[in-house]
Amino acid sequence: MAANAIDQTRRMLSLVTYLRERPGARVGDVARAFGITEDELISDLDVLPMCGTSFRGGDLLDIDTDGERIWWHNPDDVAEPLRLAADEATALLVAARAVATLPGLRESDRDALLRATAKLEAAAGETAGASSRLSVTFESEGGVFAEVDRAISERRRLWLRYYSPARDELTEREVDPIRLFAVGHTYMEAWCRLSEARRTFRLDRVAEIRLLDAPAAPPELELRDLSEGLVQPSADDPEVVVEVGPGGRWVAEYYPHDSAEELADGGLRITLRTPEPASLRRLAMRLGQDGRIVSPQDLADSARLAAREALAAYDGQE
């Protein structure tokens, strides 16, 4: 089970201290010490160089690895006592108070955050007064994130009402969450009990969420490598063939595909795979005269029907 966001933050804070005391530490030794895989450790190391003692971009952690050893080049530079400017203290206080209000946050974490906020307020002095006049309200995705994070931490199942753009409908399902991740948007990877398969859910498309008492028990799955992007078609996914004219050649640039054959008119015959072929109906509507779905036949027919219904709706308005 992948660590939740709060556990990962705790680990990365400990990792900084660990690496400071062990220059040139071996990747395998560090991963074993923290009970994680080497890939998870490398992922943490990719984030640490973005952290430091200044919000303005200076004094960042200069940590890198050659794949075998880990080197921290400026531990002394970032070890000096932290002195916050007024704007930095204000930003920290506002953010801390906002996070403390998140639903689903474990009480122990909330208490620790409130204690740290109180210490920061005492150190900030008059600046703390300015921050108290500011507030942040999280949109619904923040509450969904907190519920998913809690479900992962407590290994519990979730009930969702989820909007599927491919079918343009809300569906209800129970899922066993596996991990949270961000690729442009924030997503939950989970084992879906409705489809009995691994699925990815975008948090801003979750209309309603509820934590269940049933334990989460996803099957043992190898986590996908997302370095190549979120959409990574499988060889087992259904094959779709799309023909586009010169004005639709952009499809080959934006959609992962198996092949793109040149056509006599300057267009392309594109073969691609997708777990949800129905989602390509929107692509066909967007292409208009610049493209069409060739196969499978039922998908081509449904795209043609959707286009006719759209035209009929416009005719009805006229």
Image: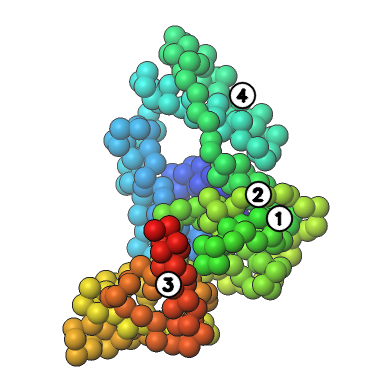
Q: Residues within 10 Å of mark 3 (few under 14, many from 20)?
A: some
Distance (Cα) linking label 2 and label 3? 31 Å
Q: For mark 4, what is the residue?
A: 115
The amino acid at mark 2 is Glu
Name the residue tied to disc 3: 307
Sequence-earlier tag: 2 or 1: 1
Q: Amino acid at mark 1?
A: Leu
Front one among 246 and 274 = 246
**What is the three-letter code of the residue carrying label 4?**
Arg
Q: Which mark is residue 180?
A: none
Label 4 vs 3, first from the N-terminus: 4
Q: CA distance from mark 2 to mark 4?
A: 32 Å
- Nearest to the eye among marks 2 and 4: give it: 2
* Residue position for label 2: 208
Q: Quadrant of the C terminus?
A: bottom left
Q: Say which label, 4 or 1, has the lower sequence index.
A: 4
Residue 303 seen from this side: no
